[in-house]
Every structure is written in structure tokens, then in C-alpha cells.
Image (tube, grey):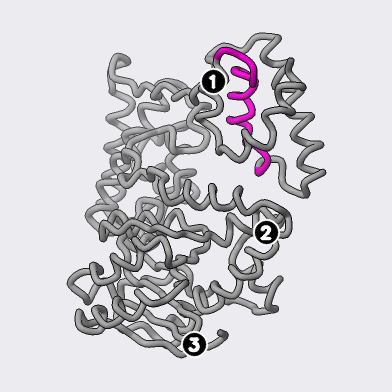
Amino acid sequence: MNTTTHTWIDTDEGLARLGKDLAGERGVAVDTESDGFHHYFDKLCLLQLSTREANFLVDPLAVSSLDPLRPMFADQGIRKVMHAAEQDIMYLRRDHHLEVKGLFDTAAAAQLTGRTRLGLAALLEAYFEIHLSKSNQRDDWSLRPLNPAQLAYAVSDTNNLLALADLLEQEVREKGRQEWADEEYRALEQKQINLNSAAPDEITRVKGWKDLPPRGRAVLRELLRGRDCEARKRDRPPFRIAPASLLLELAAKPPADIRELQSRKGFPRQRSSSLTRQFMDAVTRGLELPESEFPQPPPRAAHPGQRQRRDAPFEERVNRLRAWRKTRAEQLGLEPGVVISQRDLEAVAENPPGSQGEDTTRQGLRQWRWREFSAEWRQLLS
């Protein structure tokens, strides 16, 4: 179905009717739009739904609740087709307490067929020669009314998803990987997504923080706090107040005064006195902070079965598994990371099949990987 025709739903009555109609469908394509590029507190702003016959755009900002759609989302028998669903599931769960069951993720399916270009635009072009415009991707979807281009963009994200899922499912079945795919879908449904963003002053979010001396890390934390304060006041995402690269530079080479601060490359052209004051005060606080109050990076959480110290036998097992993964990926026509991730590979090296700790490894893996490869791992590492 390649059309931009749709039904706009912004009343409780209309949503109630849609909920009843969708209860009789076998498959529904789903996507969402948010306003995270424009606001400090992002939210679900648009819900796109497509059946094989019709498209619907639901305005979550206008209806009192999305509860009429709860039965559809919870029904395992109604396939919900989504692309790279993790973010969409997060918004539905966080903002409307909706859980998705019966997921079919077209990105996960495409990955298991061996495709490397997994974006929706790339897949639609490959399968249907449809060229999907992403020009409205970063629009502020909280604004109303939406213009015709935005409406067409929103519909285009779902009106071909069901047909795409049909083709991908066929390919996955032909390769004998349906059980693999089903397990990946269920894992996405059940994944515990962190609904709370990281602390705004967490320095480890800034690439390059490890290169800073302890005093520089203190300055960086204060700059992050100042940026966050300004972002809240302006209701803008922190990265649109100032890029992390600027904060890193200021932490590495703190400016002596406001003039030097404003001369730094990347400092916002709209030099509000509020932002300048926030940053200069942050630099001063960081430079004056006692060493006892310097930020301490959180300890790295270990994966179940993953050792903290690496020894020669462990490294040897890792190297064997890496070589095996490369060869196996080529045989299967998959990316090496799809066969097994580096983290899981190290868990296998730590507690291989046949060892006393194999249960720990098995429980931490997708079961299809254990079923398919554990005998090979046992032979390789015995």
C-alpha cells in the first residue's frame, strides 16, 4: 500500500472506534514521532498505525489516553510490525504504560537475512524501489497543525511495513532462522529499557573524558551541570545549548575570563549573558573544587560470567572464538556481531560449554545461539 491517504484521529471517540477496528486485524504497522530534538523533556507526539487497507495518525497530545489501543498492543495474535522498535517501545511504555506483544521487527529480521544496510529507507529502496524522504525527521512534532509534508512523511514510515515484513519473513524462513528471529523479537519486547536518562552531570557520557586530568574532569562535571541548568530554563535539549566537544575543550584548557570563553571555537553565536555566566561560574567551581570532591567514574558493570582480570589461557580462548566467529559468519552470510557479540564471546571464553560455569553462560545468551553453536564451542575449546 503506497499512499499518503490517512485518517487523522484526535478525539477520544475516534480513538475508541479505532481500537475496536484494530482488534480484528492480523497485523498492524506501528511507528512513533517525538520532539526530543527540540525540548528538554521529550514526549510521544504522534502515533502512526497502518493496516493493509488504511493508515491512521493518532495525536497523543489531543486524546485523553491511548488506553483504547491497549488490547491491540497486548494481543500476541496481532502482529505489530515495527522498525528498530526499541525507541518506539520506550515511548509507548514510558508515556502511556503500553506493552507491545507480538512484535515483528523489520530491522532485526533484515539483520538475520545478512543485510548490512538496515535503515528503513535502505530496505524500502532495496525491496520496493521506494525512495523514502527523511527531510522531516527532526521536525518539532509537538507543534500543531502538522503540514502536508509532515503528514506524508509520517504515513510513509508505516504504510509499507506490513509488505516489507512479509518478504523478510519469507527470507528468514527460507534460511531456517525463524526461531532465531522469534527469539530476537521476544527479547525486544521484554528488554528493560532505562526510562530515565543518565544523570546530566555524568562525565562518562562525554567522549574523551578519560583523557582529562582529575582537575579537568571536575571542570567538565560542573560544565555539564551548568549546561543542563540552561537547557531546563530554555526547554531545549542540552546538546543544542552547547556541544559536548566544547565542554571537553573548556575542561582541558579552562578559559581565564569571559572574553576568552566567548572566543572559543564552538561557543554559541547567540552569546546570552545567562549562558556565559553559567559556563564561567562552572569553570571557576571546577578549578576551586577540593580533590576529595572530584568525580569518580562508576565501576564498570561486569557481564554475567565475565572475568575482571584477563590471563593468557582466557585470551587464547577469546582468540580462538574470534577466528571461529569470522569463519562462521562468512559461512552464514551474516555480520560477525550477529553471530555473537564481543561481550557474549568473552562470556563463552570465561565459562565454555562443558565447564562448571556453563549454565551462567547459557542463561546470558539468546538460546538460539546456544542451540546452534555450543557443540562447536565445546569442541573448539576442549
3 or 1: tag closer to the N-terminus: 3
Q: Which residue is drawn at 59% across and 66% down?
A: 120
Across and down, in percent, residue 55 comes to: 43, 83
Q: Nearer the viewer, residue 294 or 353?
A: 353
Mark on residue 306? Answer: 1
Q: Name the residue under label 3.
A: 4
On the rendered image, what quadrant is the N terminus found in?
Answer: bottom right
Q: With 380 as the anchor, is 87 left or right in this view?
A: left
Give amino acid for label 1.
Answer: Gln
Q: Give the range drawn in magenta.
A: 338-356
Q: Which of 74 and 326 is in front in this view?
A: 74
Mark 2–mark 3 distance (CA, rounded to whole Å): 31 Å
Q: With 304 as the anchor, is 297 left or right in this view?
A: left
Residue 150 shows in the view: yes
Q: Name the residue under label 2.
A: 173
Across and down, in percent, residue 313 comes to: 70, 10
CB within 8 Å, label 3 to label 1:
no
2 or 3: tag closer to the N-terminus: 3
